[in-house]
C-alpha cells in the first residue's frame, strides 16, 4: 500500500528538452501513472490468458473454425452492447462501474482456472465463459478509455492514448512468453489464475482512486442518450472517417489474431512456448514503434502514416503465408506489430481528441463496436477461409484485401491534426 501511494505522488519522469514530441510525457502525472501501471498489470494478465485460451482450444477442438471462435466469443458482446455500455459510462460514476466489471472478470477467470485445473472444461464451456468475459469487458473498456481525459490535459490526450497502446503491447511482448512457460511448467489453468490476480490489482487501484471530476449526463432518457452518441459519430466527419478506418484495417488484420494459434502449431510445428514467443515478438515490434510514432505522425501526417502501416502489415501477412524460417519470420512479425500499433493508436487518439467530454464514452462505445464487430466477423471469415483453402491461402487473401483497403483509406482523411 505504501508503494502504491509513492507511485501516486513521486515524479519519476522529469521533463526533457524534447518534451514537445516525447511519447512518455503523460507519465509525469502521478494519477495517470498509477492508472497506466494498473493497466499494464491487467493487460499482462489478459495476454497470458489469451495464450492459455487459444492453446486450450487447440487441445479441445483443433478445427480452424473453433480456434477462431475463441476470439469471436470475446468480441461478440462488444459488438452488441458497446454503445449501451458507453451510455452507462456517461450517465453513472465511472469508478463504481469499473469496480463492478473488474469484480465480475475476477470471478469468471477464477472459475475458468478451477474448471481447467480439474479437467472439467469443454470446448463450448470455454467459449461460454469467454463470452461472459466479453460482457464484462464491454462495460470496462469504454469506461476506462473515457476516464483517460480526466487524468491528463487535453493537449496530452494523443500521447496518453499512445502510452495505453505501449502498455497493451508491452504486455503482449511479455505476456505470451510468460504464458507459454506457465503452460509448459505448471499447466494451462495457471494462465487463467494469473489473469484473475491482475484483475485484483486493478480493483485495489480503483479503491484508492478519488475522482476530482464527476460530471455524469442524465438529462436524457437512456435510448435518447444512445441515439445522441450514434448521431454525433455519424455526422462528425472525423469520427465517421475513424470508423471507416477501423473497418478497413481490422477486417483483414483479424486474420493474424484468429489464425495464429493454429499457424504456430500446424505451419511452424511449434509448441505453446513457440506460440507465446511469436505473439510476444509482435508486441515487441509495437512497443518499439511507439517510441517513434509521434515523430512519424508529425513528419508524414496521420493519413499517409496509417496507409503505410496498413501496407506494411499486408506484406507481413504474405511473408507469413510462406512459413519462413525464424530469421525471416522475426523481423516480419516485429514490423507487423509496429504497423498494428501505429494504425489503431492513431485512430483511437483521433476519436478521443474529437469527442466532447459529455459524449466521450458513447463515442468510444461506437468505436469499440466497429472494432469488435470487424474482429468478430473477420475471425469467422478467415476461419472459414482457412478451412476451405488452407492457412497459407487465407493469409494470402487477407494480404490482398489489406493492400486494397490501405489505398481506399486515403479517401477518408482523419482531418484533425493531433498535437504531438
Image (cartoon, rainbow, N blue to C red):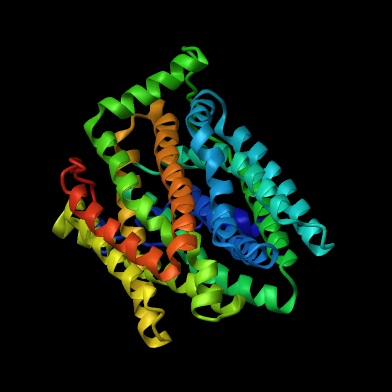
Q: Residue at x 17, y 40 (%)?
A: 415
361 and 2: which is toward the camera: 361
Q: Is residue 132 left or right of residue 31?
A: right
41 and 413: which is toward the camera: 413
Q: Is residue 77 left or right of residue 346?
A: right
Residue 384 location (% of width, % of height): 48, 55
Q: Residue at x 45, y 14 (%)?
A: 224
Residue 151 is at least partly visible in this image: no
Residue 175 is at least partly visible in this image: yes
Q: Residue at x 42, y 56 (%)?
A: 254
Establish if 363 lies above or below 148: above
Residue 325 placement: quadrant: bottom left
Residue 402 location (% of width, % of height): 29, 57
Q: Quadrant of the N terminus?
A: bottom right
Q: Is residue 187 left or right of residue 365?
A: right
Residue 252 placement: quadrant: bottom left
Residue 357 location (% of width, % of height): 38, 29
- How many marks can you see? 0
Residue 64 placement: quadrant: bottom right
Residue 202 location (% of width, % of height): 62, 50
99 and 204: which is toward the camera: 99
Establish if 22 lies above or below 231: below
Q: Residue furthest front?
A: 388
Amino acid at each position: 500500500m505504501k508503494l502504491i501511494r509513492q507511485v501516486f505522488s513521486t515524479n519519476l519522469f522529469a521533463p526533457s528538452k524534447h518534451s514537445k514530441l516525447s511519447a512518455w510525457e503523460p507519465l509525469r502525472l502521478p494519477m495517470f501513472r498509477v492508472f497506466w501501471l494498473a493497466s499494464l498489470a491487467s493487460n499482462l494478465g489478459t495476454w497470458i490468458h489469451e495464450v492459455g485460451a487459444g492453446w486450450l482450444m487447440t487441445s479441445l477442438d483443433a478445427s480452424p473454425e473453433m480456434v477462431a471462435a475463441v476470439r469471436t466469443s470475446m468480441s461478440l458482446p462488444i459488438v452488441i452492447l458497446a454503445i449501451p455500455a458507453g451510455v452507462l459510462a456517461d450517465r453513472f460514476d465511472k469508478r463504481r462501474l469499473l469496480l463492478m466489471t473488474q469484480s465480475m472478470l475476477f470471478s469468471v477467470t477464477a472459475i475458468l482456472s478451477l474448471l481447467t485445473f480439474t479437467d472439467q472444461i469443454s470446448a463450448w464451456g470455454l467459449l461460454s465463459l469467454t463470452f461472459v468475459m466479453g460482457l464484462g469487458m464491454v462495460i470496462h473498456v469504454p469506461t476506462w478509455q473515457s476516464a483517460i481525459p480526466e487524468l491528463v490535459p487535453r493537449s496530452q490526450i494523443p500521447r496518453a492514448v499512445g502510452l495505453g497502446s505501449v502498455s497493451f503491447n508491452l504486455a503482449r511482448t511479455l505476456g505470451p512468453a510468460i504464458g507459454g512457460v506457465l503452460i509448459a511448467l505448471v499447466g494451462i489453468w495457471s494462465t487463467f489464475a494469473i489473469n484473475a490476480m491482475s484483475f485484483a490489482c486493478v480493483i485495489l487501484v480503483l479503491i484508492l482512486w478519488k475522482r476530482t471530476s464527476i460530471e455524469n449526463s442524465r438529462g436524457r432518457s437512456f435510448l435518447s442518450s444512445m441515439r445522441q452518441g450514434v448521431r454525433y459519430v455519424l455526422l462528425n466527419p472525423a469520427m465517421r472517417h475513424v470508423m471507416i478506418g477501423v473497418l478497413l484495417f481490422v477486417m483483414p488484420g483479424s486474420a493474424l489474431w484468429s489464425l495464429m494459434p493454429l499457424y504456430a502449431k500446424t505451419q511452424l510445428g511449434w509448441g505453446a512456448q513457440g506460440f507465446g514467443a511469436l505473439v510476444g515478438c509482435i508486441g515487441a515490434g509495437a512497443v518499439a514503434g511507439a517510441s517513434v510514432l509521434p515523430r512519424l505522425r508529425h513528419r508524414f501526417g496521420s493519413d499517409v502514416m496509417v496507409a503505410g502501416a496498413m501496407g506494411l502489415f499486408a506484406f507481413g501477412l504474405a511473408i507469413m503465408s510462406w512459413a519462413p524460417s525464424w530469421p525471416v519470420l522475426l523481423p516480419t512479425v516485429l514490423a507487423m506489430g509496429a504497423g498494428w500499433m501505429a494504425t489503431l493508436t492513431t485512430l483511437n487518439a483521433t476519436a478521443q481528441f474529437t469527442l466532447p467530454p459529455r459524449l466521450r464514452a458513447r463515442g468510444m462505445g461506437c468505436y469499440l463496436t466497429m472494432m469488435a464487430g470487424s474482429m468478430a466477423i473477420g475471425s469467422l471469415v478467415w476461419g472459414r477461409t482457412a478451412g476451405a483453402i488452407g492457412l497459407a491461402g487465407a493469409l494470402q487473401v487477407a494480404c490482398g484485401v489489406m493492400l486494397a483497403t490501405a489505398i481506399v483509406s486515403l479517401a477518408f482523411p482523419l482531418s484533425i491534426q493531433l498535437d504531438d
